[in-house]
Image: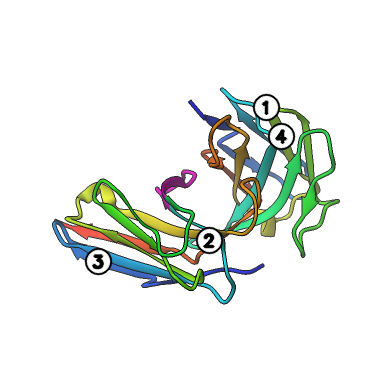
């Protein structure tokens, strides 16, 4: 099935640094979502974006829905150890019960 | 609110046996449930979409006779891996949609299947 391309694939950062990751698609989505997955658990929704160009924040997290509808980025400011995990973007086409297409994931590791 | 549980959390079975995984929405009625498979260090890949009371819709390449999905009630969907083989070993995750006033799909904690 289709997957969205995320970059970087993984990153090591120091505590306190800002993080930026992005997600690109060859096709348009109507909704972009960002999830975090801890080892051995299901993903948890961080931010949802519903409109092209939309910029939304959730605490230290900020995400934007690309104007072309084919990309999105997620920024994490002032990273802390509990930010460690895998971050996935997901695109959704039509309707709220429609399926999600997940990105390839960005693995974030924070060093003290 | 919006808690989704899965049972079991881990299961080990012998090759050739069948395994049933349950997905329950604990505090809301899930009109639609989704089943995903995730291989180690990989992303979630949708296997099928199930609506309560109707047959599941499978993604291309997913064998419906091997991965039996039943969504008999608004709070329970089951995935049965029939005649499991080692290559079916994976992390299976469900999500549920239908919480009133929410557009979100809520994910379960996943089930780790190991086939020996």
Residue under label 4, please give it. Answer: B77
Residues indicated by labels 4 and 1 sit on the same polypeptide chain: yes
Residue B64 position within the rendered picture, expressed as x and y whole percent measured from the top left = 83, 52
SS for tag 1? Answer: loop
Residue under label 1, please give it. Answer: B75
Image: B17 above or below B76: below
Labelled disc at residue B43: 2
Residue B47 position within the rendered picture, expressed as x and y whole percent measured from the top left = 70, 54
Residue A54 position within the rendered picture, expressed as x and y whole percent measured from the top left = 39, 59
Distance, label 4 to label 3, CA atoms, is 39 Å
- Specify whether A106 is left or right of A25: left
Quadrant of the rendered structure where residue B13 is? Answer: top right
Work out whether residue B31 or residue A50 is closer to the camera in this orientation and state it: A50
Distance, label 4 to label 2, CA atoms, is 22 Å
Chain ID at mark 1: B
Residue drawn at x 19%, y 51% is: A80
Name the colour scheme.
rainbow
The magenta-colored residue range is A35-47
């Amino acid at each position: 099935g289709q997957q969205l391309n995320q970059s970087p694939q993984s990153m090591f950062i120091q505590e306190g640094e800002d993080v930026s990751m992005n997600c690109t698609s060859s096709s348009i989505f109507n909704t972009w979502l960002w999830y975090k997955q801890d080892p051995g658990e299901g993903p948890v929704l961080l931010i949802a974006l519903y409109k092209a160009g939309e910029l939304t924040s959730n605490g230290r997290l900020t995400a934007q829905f690309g104007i072309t509808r084919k990309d999105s980025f997620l920024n994490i400011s002032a990273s802390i150890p509990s930010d460690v995990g895998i971050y996935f973007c997901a695109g959704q086409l039509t309707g709220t019960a429609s399926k999600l297409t997940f990105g390839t994931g960005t693995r974030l590791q924070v060093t003290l | 609110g919006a808690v989704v549980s899965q049972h079991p959390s881990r299961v080990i079975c012998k090759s050739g046996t069948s395994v049933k995984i349950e997905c329950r929405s604990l505090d809301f009625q899930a009109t639609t449930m989704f089943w995903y498979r995730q291989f180690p260090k990989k992303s979630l890949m949708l296997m099928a979409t199930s609506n309560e009371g109707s047959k599941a819709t499978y993604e291309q390449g997913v064998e419906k006779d091997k991965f039996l999905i039943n969504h008999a009630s608004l709070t329970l969907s089951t995935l049965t891996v029939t005649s499991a083989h080692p290559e079916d070993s994976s992390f299976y995750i469900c999500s549920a949609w239908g919480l009133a006033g929410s557009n979100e799909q809520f994910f379960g904690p996943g089930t780790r299947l190991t086939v020996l």
